[in-house]
Amino acid sequence: MRALRFVIVLVVVFGSITAFATDARVESMGKSARFIMDDMSIFDNPANINLYPNFLIGELGVYNGSRASGVKSGQNQDPWDPWFGGLFSLNIGGGNALSIGGVLGRKDERLLKYFPDYIIGPAGIPFETPIPVTNFDGFLGAALGSTAVGLHIYIAHQGGITNEGIITKDAFASALQLDGGVNIELSNDYQLEVAAGIARIQYGPSNHALFDSELLSEFLNARFFSRINAIDGHLIPVASIRNMHAPGRSEMDISLGAGVDTKFTRGFFWLGLTGFYNIQKAGSNWEWGRSVEDAEGNIERIGGTFFTDLDDGGWGPGSRAKLQQVGGIISFGIERNLWWDWFVMRVGGQKVIAYASYSKSDDIDFSVLCPSAPNGTPCRESGSYFVTNPVNDGTTDDNVGFGFGVNIEEKLKVDFTVSEDFPFRNFFQGGTRWISKISATYSF
C-alpha cells in the first residue's frame, strides 16, 4: 500500500475523473484528452504510467473515415490498426515503486502523418511508402513519494521492401521518438505535469544518420490541475509547443488553453478553450496528386501525397510553399451512468475556427499545403481565408462524437464509439456499421 501512496493520493485529489479511460472514450467525449486525466495521457507524459499500475490496454481497431467508405455492402473487413499493451508496477519499499510497460502495434499519427503516400526514387518510379511494422512503445517509470517520473521510446520502422513485397534498398520509412516527463503532486489541491522529447522522421531512398540534426524535432507540453471546491472540479491551464521536421516538411505549432471539469450525480463534464498558432512549410518536391496519361491519351490526376527524393536534404530546388494558421478550438465532453452503474453514455465535440494565410511556391502548383489541390485545382495565387475542422468525416478531427461504455466490477472496462452515420441509416438495406472503435482496459 505504501508503494501506491502516490496513486491513492491522486485518486482522492482527482476523484471526479475516471481513472481508466480508453481512446474510444476520448473520441466519443470531446475528441481530445487535453483537459482530462486518463490512461491515454501516458503517450503525452510517460510519468503517468505510475498512475495506472498493473493493467492491460488494447484497441480492436478503427472502422471509420475514408477507408471504411470503400467497403462494399456485405463485405467482411476487419477494423484497421488494432493494438495492445500493458503496464506493470513493482513495490521497492519506502513508499516507492517502479513501473514498466509496453504497447505493440500503435500508430502514432502525430509522427506518421508526415509520411508521404508515395515516394519517387532515383528511377522516377513512384512506390507506396513502406508501412512501418515495428510500431513499439516502451515505458519505464518510478513513483518516488509525491513525484512520478517516466521515460518513453517509440519506434516505427520498415526498410528494404515495398508494400507489394518487392525487395529494394529504396524503400525506407522510419520514425523514432524519445521523451520523458514528470508528474508532481504539489499539494492536495494542485498537480503539475511537464513532458518533453525529441523525434526523428525519415523516409525515401536517401540514407540518413540515426540522429540527423536537420531532421530532429522537439516538443514540450505542460498542464496544471487546480482544485475548485465550488464546482467540485478543477481549473486546468495547458500549454504545448511542437517544432517538427521531416524531409521537405516542417511544422511549428504553439498552443495555450484553459479548461474546467466537474462531477455531478453519476456523471462527469469538461469544457476547454485552446488558442493556437501553426506554420507549415513544404518543399517543391512535395506534391499532391500525380498527372498520368491513360490508354486513350487523356491526362488525369491521381490522388495522394508524392515526395520526390533528390538526396539534397529533402527540400528540392526553388521556393517553398507556406501555410500559417492562427485560431482557437472550443471543445467539451460529458458522460453519465444511465439505468445501471455498469453502463455509461457519452457525447462530446469540438469546433475549430482559424484564419489561414497561404503563400504559394513559384515552382509547384499542387503543393501538399495547397487547400484546393485534393480537388484537382492548382494553387497559382497566395491568399488568406478562414478554415474549420471537418464536420462529419468520421475521424477524430470532426465535430461531434457519441459512444457508450460498460464497466464490469471495476476491472474490465470496454468503451465503444458509435458510427456517426448509424442513426441515419436504413437497417433494412444492409451494410450498417454500428461501431467505429472499440477499446478496453483490464486492471488486476
Image (tube, grey):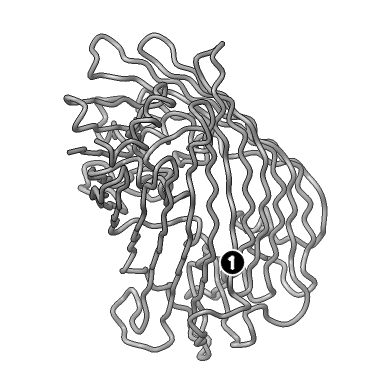
Along the line of sight, the residue nearer the viewer: 63 or 19: 19
Per the image, label 1 sits on a secondary structure element best described as strand
Report the residue at 39% width, 8% height from top: 265
Q: x and y percent of residue 241 in the render?
A: 64, 52
Side of 311 relative to 137 (left or right) = right
**Coordinates of residue 72 in the picture (x, y in percent):** 29, 46
Height in image: 185 above or below 154?
above
Q: Residue at 32% across / 15% down in the picture?
A: 337
Quadrant of image for the N terminus:
top left
Instruction: Say whether residue 421 is visible.
Output: yes
Residue at horizontal 25 percent and vertical 39 percent from the top: 441
The quadrant where residue 105 appears: bottom left
Task: Judge whether residue 88 can be spotted in this image.
Answer: no
- Pointer 1: residues within 10 angstroms few (<14), some, or many (20+)? many
Q: Which residue is at the front of the view, 188 or 334?
A: 188
In the displayed structure, 193 sits above or below 107; it is above
Give 436 or 37, whichever is nearer the viewer: 37
Left-right relation of 304 to 6: right
Q: Amino acid at mark 1?
A: Ser
The quadrant in which residue 50 appears is top left
- x then y, percent, for residue 53: 27, 43
The residue lying at 54 percent from left, 30 percent from top is 190
**Number of numbered discs on residues:** 1
Relative placement, left or right, of 80 versus 270 is: left
The residue singled out by tag 1 in the image is 217
